[in-house]
Amino acid sequence: MSRFRTRIGLAAGIATVAALALAGCSSSDPLTGGGESSAAPASDTIVIGSQQYASNEIIAEIYAQALEGAGFTVDRKFNIGQRDAYIPSLEDGTIQLFPEYTGNLLQFFDPDTTATTSDDVYTALKEVLPEGLTVLDQSPATDQDSYNVTAAFAQEHNLTSIGDLAGIPNLVLGGAPELEKRPYGPIGLKEKYGVDVTFSATADTTVDELVAGNIQIANVYSADPRIKTDDLVTLEDPEGLFLASHVVPVVSTSVADEIADVINAVSAALTPEGLVALNVESTVDQRSPEDIAKDWLAANNLS
């Protein structure tokens, strides 16, 4: 599975470092504002966090600049790490706003969830969040598992949906090793869509293997910029094989009503294609999150 975020390979190390920082073991802790102790934010300041990868930081920066444009004072606590590190800070109010992903966050709090569609996942997420936390409107933008083929392969076989793969012989699916046993892997493809595949554990080389023609289907996260830069086609998933995972603001209930209008407007404007384009600006054009956010807000009349 191609993840330009590098969440899998670095998750354990990042979470450990961030957890130590949260415990006050480092003066560079992003939650402590340098050497100061971690404390509840001032009542007139909105503290925004982000995970430690570019896409999430860009969204957090968009939130920050949108709120500043609306007259709010914002404190940025970016690049914290993974959920084990920052969820406690959301729960205790040290951080009040965080860009998240509906499906992945739902599975964090409810690993046995059976919800898969956008609406069901969003509803289930609201029900399992800890007291003191809520979510604002989910965005159309997604960052979730998806099945992709090359544009040439899609044209050759007239593909738009996963189900269109049924009957094509000798299909090889590539992705992270664990995909082979996941419910949305080869088993799910057969059960939901009647698609027969063999599996190849391609991990970080998944897109390269797809472009080279060594596999025909690639499991890629939907906001990966290589979907655009390598001219891939994401196949539609009408049967809900994958757990929907839309960008969603997680927010302290104490400030939710106060910031909802501003942040919901951002969420409504952020599209799946738009999120990929933002990530291309970061990874390919090497632009800063601050500049990307500023231009995006202006282009969407939100600045």
Image (cartoon, rainbow, N blue to C red):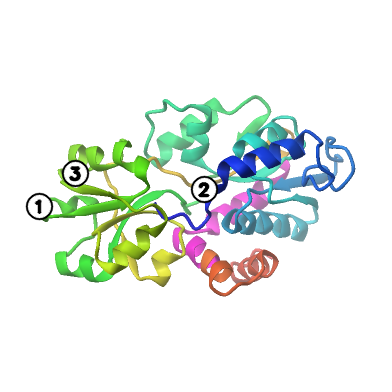
Q: Are marks 1 and 3 in contact (CB under 8 Å)?
A: no
* Rendered view: 205 above or below 291: above
Decide which of tag 1 and tag 2 comes sooner along the chain.
2
Decide which of tag 1 and tag 3 comes sooner along the chain.
1
* Rendered view: 277 above or below 96: below
User: Magenta stretch containing residue 245, yes or no?
Assistant: no
Q: Which residue is under mark 3?
A: 193
Q: Which residue is under mark 2?
A: 9
**Separation of residues labelled 1 and 3 (CA atoms):** 10 Å
In the picture, the disc for residue 167 is 1
Q: Nearer the viewer, residue 96 or 196?
A: 196
Q: Is residue 27 left or right of residue 98?
A: right
Q: Position of residue 200 (x, y in %)?
A: 27, 50
Q: Nearer the viewer, residue 245 or 179?
A: 179
Q: Is residue 82 left or right of residue 44?
A: left
Q: Nearer the viewer, residue 17 or 85?
A: 17
In the rendered structure, which amino acid carries the disc numbered 1? Gly
**Separation of residues labelled 1 and 2 (CA atoms):** 35 Å
Task: Spot the residue most to the right.
Answer: 36
